[in-house]
Image (spheres, rainbow, N blue to C red):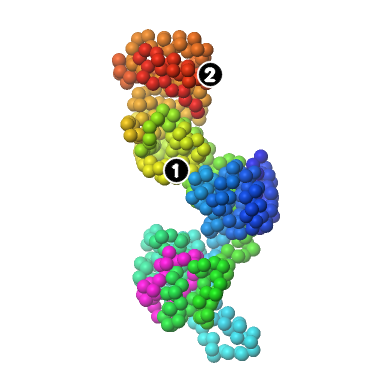
Amino acid sequence: MPKVLVSDKLSKTAVQIFKDNNIEVDYLPDLGKDKEKLLEVIGQYDGLAIRSATKVTEKIIAAAANLKVIGRAGIGVDNVDIPAATKKGIIVMNTPFGNMITTAEHAIAMMMALARQLPEADASTRASKWEKNRFMGVEVTNKTLGVIGAGNIGKIVIDRALGLKMKVIAYDPFLSPEKAMEIGAEKVDLDELYRRADFITIHTPSLAETRGMINAEAIAKMKDGVRFINCARGDLMDEKALYDGLKSGKIAGAALDVFNVEPAENNPLFELPNVICTPHLGASTTEAQENVALQVAEQISAYLNTGEIANALNFPSITAEEAPRLTPWVKLAETLGSFAGQLTETAIKGIKVEFEGAVSALNTKPMVAAAINGVLKPQMGEINMVSAPQIAKDRGIVVEVTNRDQQGAYESYIRLTVITERQERGVAGTVFANGKPRVIQVKGINMEAELTPSMLYVTNEDKPGHIGRLGTLLGKLGINIANFNLGRAEVGGDAIALLSIDGTLTEPQLKEIAALEGVKQAKALKF
């Protein structure tokens, strides 16, 4: 039975979801704050469910001998060392959809508070000042809202703003004009958004292209008296440039839920009366906390029980519907990779994976990962489908993927080619109706062979008597042949024998086989 640790405060309903899915769970909500204790116990768990308090460092990951999945209840994963987890073969998941509505509503609330100066008015009234004339606000009706980033949260913000009778313009490089019209916004470029918007709200991820995008240059392009809202990521804005814009009056006000450094302490922006600040409350509603907790429990349970992968940050997602169709093909890809990898003895420079026919229309990313894993595992041992692509990249191995329609006799097949300093070695296979993988070609030689746990691969000269000598020797060595498959390029050319055998060949036995007349290579294969 898989075992999961919940090291931060999550809903008790989430704990029950693990139990309902036959997963043993330890609910220790304060353990995440104790690094030494977490380091001591993490090795016994298959899954880890966290929020933001638990810091999953490289040291913690190194000690996690059995860990297969880390699930973050929420979007941000700054507290997880994803590269270290990837190299260890650990899936890292988040729950990007559980708090979308809550975050969007917070942005709208911040915009309304900014328009009517509510925090300052509240403080003044509590101080018995009754300063009605001081707090002259603005309406949002008929104002133009500029939305930077029209993803899941941005779209909800647009919908809510339309309900407030605002005009909405949006900038998103992945948003088509047709889709913008469909969601009720006008697509514009960034400079036009800056020029036209009365309010600007940003909802982009933190990427190299977006970090610091709200800088002095961008602010100079904005309409005088613009109001700015950021409930996304603190590093999207240059706080010094924002401070200067607010101080000069170029920006009438800013509402910020996120900051460059969090927790934010003694931030110069706090000194300004036209700034509203909240302590990263975007996801802080009862409903959102419940949603992300339940979602992460469902995702971890599904992965540990069925292999379904949802919202993974370091591996392609596999839906519950895809899993049954993909599983035999993923197994085939890994087996073909293992076949080629076990025959490869020199440094690998590249791996080519070709999908032909119906299989090319499936989600091929998990198959590619499985193929790379199969190729590298004979040489590297402790890797898996998650870590293999990153390890290949780190080692400079070029991976090339091709998808094409059916051209040959088989409805679907996968061809894998390993490129080394000395040669290219290709192997192709398909999945039969019974779900079992079959090799259909090796080194350009057509053959058909079922892949079994223990096999003998022999290349030899195509000459009479060879098969008889090989069979006689195997009998002499006490090796039982379960299946015998043959193929050749041409009469008198290279030939291949692929045998399913009982038991395991020893090195001395392999040497005797390799010494047979006409044998060019003899290799024991394990699958």
Depth check: give the residue in front, 523 or 218. 523
Give the percent coordinates (x, y) of residue 235.
46, 66
Residue 115 in sight here: no
Depth check: give the residue in front, 240 or 35. 35
Q: On the image, which quarter does residue 1 sit in?
A: top right
- Give the residue pinned by disc 1: 391
Residue positioned 45% across, 27% down in the render? 438
Disc on res. 190: none
Q: What element does badge 2 sit on?
A: loop
**Do callouts 1 and 2 mark residues in contact (Cβ within 8 Å)?**
no
The correct choice, above or below, for 320 with respect to 272 in the image is above
Q: What element does badge 1 sit on?
A: helix
Residue positioned 67% across, 42% down in the render? 22
- Give the residue pinned by disc 2: 502
Give the percent coordinates (x, y) of residue 256.
52, 72
Q: On the image, which quarter does residue 238 sit in?
A: bottom left
The correct choice, above or below, for 312 with respect to 160 in the image is above
Depth check: give the residue in front, 9 or 159. 9
Residue positioned 42% across, 67% down in the render? 212
Give the percent coordinates (x, y) of residue 255.
51, 74
Which label's residue is closer to the chain start, 1 or 2? 1
Q: Amino acid at mark 1?
A: Ile
Q: Amino acid at mark 2?
A: Asp
Q: Is residue 219 magenta?
A: yes
Residue positioned 45% across, 79% down in the render? 246
Q: Is residue 21 magenta?
A: no
Q: Is residue 355 left or right of residue 83?
A: left
The correct choice, above or below, for 424 with respect to 246 in the image is above
Eye-nearest disc, 1 or 2: 1
The correct choice, above or below, for 517 with respect to 12 in the image is above
Identify the magenta region: 211-236
Residue 369 in sight here: yes
